[in-house]
Amino acid sequence: MMRLSLQEQTDISTFKASRLSIEQQDKQARHEKLESTSFTTSTNLSVDTALSLYKLTRSQSFCETKQDTRCLVGWGNSTVVVAFRGTASMKNALADLQVCLLLYCTTCWS
């Protein structure tokens, strides 16, 4: 087993701290850039960028082909975000209408 001198241990600790500091600065700069961005319906984001907006660490996407529905679920330590893609096809529009009928059906609950 190789033993490091006190100076080598200090150098390694300093390097790790500076690398971590640079990574934190990069992350902060990306976050500030996102906060200052004007998002519109045509803004395209990568999944990683979208996850970073809410400080999420993991994600899973789901696709249901019969009704052309897509969903992305992202989660982190204390947050879960569920996002559905907007209406993109006639199949999608019909599925949207079916949901509305179920949600607002007054006789469904009797």
Image (cartoon, rainbow, N blue to C red):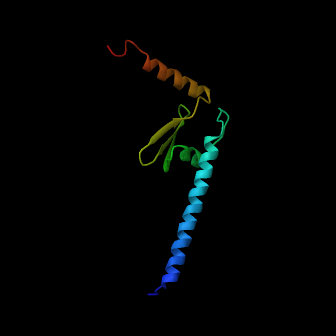
**Is 66 or 41 nearer to us in this picture?**
41
Residue occupying the point 51% across, 77% down: 10
Q: Is residue 99 above or below residue 59?
A: above
Quarter placement of the C terminus:
top left
Q: Residue furthest right?
A: 42
**Is 87 or 11 nearer to us in this picture?**
11
Q: Is residue 105 rendered to the left or right of residue 8?
A: left
**Is 66 or 86 nearer to us in this picture?**
86
**Residue 100 on image: x %, y %:** 48, 20
Residue occupying the point 64% across, 40% down: 36
**Residue 1 on image: x %, y %:** 44, 87
| Residue 87 sits in quarter | top right
Residue occupying the point 56% across, 57% down: 24
Residue occupying the point 62% across, 50% down: 30
| Residue 41 sits in quarter | top right
Q: Is residue 7 above or below residue 110?
A: below
- How many marks do you count on the picture? 0
The answer to whether one can see residue 88 in this image is yes
**Residue 76 on image: x %, y %:** 45, 48
The answer to whether one can see residue 46 in this image is no
Q: Is residue 94 above or below residue 5?
A: above
**Residue 3 on image: x %, y %:** 46, 86
